[in-house]
Image (cartoon, rainbow, N blue to C red):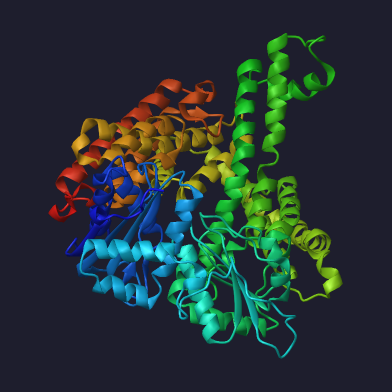
């Protein structure tokens, strides 16, 4: 196996800059110069993107930036001992020992195990002391090789065990005996933080006399905890940045949720919180049926703001609703293309009374148009129930789905529309969630998620919709639709500007999704006599296509203002923009939001205004240029998009030229990076 670290990959007692980006860039240069990576830029971009998700500083003046990258050809470990410390986000201050772990996308398990073993060694005080005292690069290499070669049995007495691989015996968990805790650690990359958090938790528990067993769900594989160990545990700790695999195994256990980094920074506090939860009958517990309950994450230490919970629930509902709308809307548009607008009046009769051997008057086109329209119409019928059902799912997990769908169906039946679906979903979700917190006998727990919660939540939420809320919401919806239908001239242009700004404000985020959901929710009300909903849909689609297309154009007009990665992203943005995928501009906005977002909004507002002013319509909810057959006034649709694209591209170029702030990616590699 190739040696992970060599003297060439070690930098001792040098100043590599003032920020994590500076240090990571130098170490990425070391890896590339050693022949283990094909390029510096790609490796740096992947490592810095990982750093921005979660800071990699850990207690003790250590940082472990790491990533998987397509630029890495062989696993590598680059190390720097800094003369000028750099803040990598650790609570105890900046770091002077930096280990940069670079793994290929398809790294083999043996290499990943070695890298994770090194990460575990870095929380041993004797090992880090030796690193700081090392005189030469070769001394560092020898120390690291020794740490990687050590067997668990040969580890010093004060080192941390690998609990998931060698669990301690578990007793019965009888009252009065020592407390028993199980834990799961996991991070997105699964190389360093996963294992360091596991060992930190075990060490903290050992000092308190607590038996703690950990399952590490990392890149080097996971050995699931024995079911008997889980059954005997008094509480569970999830120190994770990703979903826990097999979460249902811990159902009913008191739970402490936190990011994986907290397992490294504050393991003693997490263990104490788990002990307190074990003795608290009101403590939050792992739900049955494998529910994820992301809303409760971090609630122990900070809590999630009610606005964030509401936003997450609404975005979940919209995300699950979109596939129904996308397929249904395109099929309706295809039905109109084949059978004309009159197909709405005859579709039911045609599909029931005719077939390929008995075609209706008008022939095959009318028959296929009726079938396409009817399938699309039925799919669109799920719009409000799906929205409500998955809003409820985001709040109460699986037990909330049925009450949410029922409340959404009630809202649809009462013509309460999009607003009714939202309110019905929120009602169903919160009612289902509250019922799920009831303390019930053990024999009844199995019935709660599949019978009792759906039944009671459906009765209460749908009952409120029928008896109290449905009528007023339906009235408000009718008034809103009437206002939109009557829009013309200047007022329509203003609406187009607002929708254009919303679509470009956060590129697929909450504001973008609100504008999009507003458009698709009204799509079914569109007709030849009432084209206002189609106007709104056309405006929203056109404006949402502007940001990625504009960024793609800008990278062509002035390449020097963009990094290699941005230029590569620009090539992909052409197709993403043409397909109405606003998220294609996110790589640009993430690195330079103060220039990219305003420029995108400027072009989006222009496109929205032009679409509304010239009567651009869309009967399809998605697809961009690829659903040209569903676009009304196609020529102005194209003109409006091109106008917005050009304006945004020129604006972002101007901002980058005259509001200069040299991006980190463009800085040259310091001289110390040469080898």
- Asked if residue 232 shows in the view, the reply is yes
The residue most toward the bottom is: 176
Name the side, left or right, on which 316 lies relative to 355. left
In front: 34, or 334? 34
Count of numbered circles in the view: 0
Name the side, left or right, on which 237 lies relative to 643. right
In front: 149, or 554? 149
Query: What residue is rendered at 83% in x and 75% in y?
Result: 441
In front: 672, or 619? 672
What is the x, y in percent for residue 505? 39, 48
Residue 354 higher or lower than 445, as above or below: above
The residue most toward the right is: 443
The residue most toward the front is: 154
What is the x, y in percent for residue 26? 23, 54
What is the x, y in percent for residue 293? 62, 63
Query: What residue is rendered at 71% in x and 57% in y?
Result: 398
Residue 115 higher or lower than 336, as above or below: below
Query: What residue is rendered at 24% in x and 74% in y?
Result: 133
Query: What residue is rendered at 40% in x and 41% in y?
Result: 500
Name the side, left or right, on which 456 lies relative to 333. right
- Asked if residue 496 shows in the view, the reply is no
Name the side, left or right, on which 637 lies relative to 606. right
What is the x, y in percent for residue 424? 68, 56
């Amino acid at each position: 196996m190739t040696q992970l670290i060599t003297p060439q990959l070690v930098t001792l007692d040098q100043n590599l800059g003032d920020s994590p980006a500076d240090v990571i860039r130098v170490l990425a240069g070391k890896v590339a110069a050693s022949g283990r990576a094909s390029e510096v830029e790609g490796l740096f971009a992947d490592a810095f993107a990982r750093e921005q998700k979660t800071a990699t500083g850990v207690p003790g003046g250590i940082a472990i930036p790491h990533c998987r990258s397509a630029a890495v050809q062989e696993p590598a470990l680059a190390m720097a001992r800094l003369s000028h410390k750099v803040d990598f986000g650790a609570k105890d201050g900046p770091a002077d020992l930096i280990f940069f772990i670079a793994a290929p996308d398809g790294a083999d398990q043996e290499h990943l195990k070695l890298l994770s073993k090194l990460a575990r060694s870095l929380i041993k005080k004797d090992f880090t002391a030796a690193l700081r005292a090392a005189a030469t690069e070769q001394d560092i290499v020898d120390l690291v090789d020794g740490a990687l070669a050590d067997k668990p049995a040969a580890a010093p007495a004060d080192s941390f065990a690998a609990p998931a691989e060698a669990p301690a015996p578990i007793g019965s968990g009888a009252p009065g005996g020592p407390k028993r805790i199980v834990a799961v650690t996991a991070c997105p990359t699964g190389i360093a933080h996963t294992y360091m958090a596991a060992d930190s938790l075990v060490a903290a528990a050992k000092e308190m006399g607590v038996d703690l067993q950990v399952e590490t769900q990392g890149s080097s594989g996971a050995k699931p905890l024995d079911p008997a160990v889980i059954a005997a545990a008094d509480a569970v700790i999830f120190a994770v940045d990703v979903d826990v695999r097999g979460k249902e195994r811990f159902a009913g256990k008191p739970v402490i949720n936190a990011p994986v980094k907290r397992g490294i920074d504050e393991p003693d506090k997490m263990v104490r919180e788990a002990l307190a939860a074990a003795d608290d009958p009101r403590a939050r517990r792992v739900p049955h049926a494998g529910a994820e309950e992301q809303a409760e994450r971090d609630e122990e230490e900070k809590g999630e703001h009610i606005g964030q919970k509401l936003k997450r629930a609404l975005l979940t509902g919209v995300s699950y609703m979109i596939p129904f709308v996308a397929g249904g809307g395109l099929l309706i548009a295809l039905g109109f293309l084949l059978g004309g607008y009159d197909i709405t009046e005859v579709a039911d009769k045609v599909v029931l009374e005719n077939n390929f051997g008995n075609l209706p008057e008008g022939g095959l086109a009318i028959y296929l148009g009726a079938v396409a329209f009817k399938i699309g119409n039925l799919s669109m019928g799920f719009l409000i129930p799906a929205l409500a059902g998955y809003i409820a799912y985001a709040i109460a997990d699986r037990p909330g789905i049925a009450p949410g769908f029922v409340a959404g169906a009630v809202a649809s039946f009462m013509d309460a529309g999009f607003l009714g679906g939202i309110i019905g979903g929120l009602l169903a979700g919160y009612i289902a969630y509250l019922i799920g917190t009831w303390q019930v006998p053990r024999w009844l727990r199995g019935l709660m998620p599949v019978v009792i919660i759906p039944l009671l939540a459906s009765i209460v939420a749908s009952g409120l919709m029928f008896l109290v809320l449905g009528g007023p919401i339906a009235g408000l919806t009718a008034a809103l639709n009437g206002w939109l239908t009557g829009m013309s001239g200047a007022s329509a242009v203003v609406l187009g500007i607002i929708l254009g700004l919303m679509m470009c404000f956060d590129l697929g985020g909450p504001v973008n999704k609100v504008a999009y959901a507003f458009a698709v929710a009204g799509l079914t009300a569109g007709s030849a006599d009432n084209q206002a909903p189609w106007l709104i849909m056309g405006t929203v689609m056109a404006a949402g296509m502007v940001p990625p297309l504009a960024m793609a154009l800008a990278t062509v007009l002035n390449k020097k203002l963009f990094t290699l990665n941005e230029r590569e992203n620009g090539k992909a943005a052409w197709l993403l923009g043409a397909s109405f995928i606003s998220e294609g501009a996110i790589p640009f906005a993430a690195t330079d939001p103060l220039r990219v977002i305003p420029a995108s909004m400027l072009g989006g507002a222009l496109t929205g205004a032009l679409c509304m002013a010239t009567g651009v319509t869309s009967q399809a909810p998605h697809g961009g240029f690829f659903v040209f057959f569903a676009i009304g006034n196609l020529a102005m649709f194209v003109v409006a998009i091109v106008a917005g694209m050009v304006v945004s591209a020129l604006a972002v170029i101007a901002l980058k030229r005259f509001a200069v702030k040299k991006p980190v990616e463009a800085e040259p590699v310091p001289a110390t990076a040469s080898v």
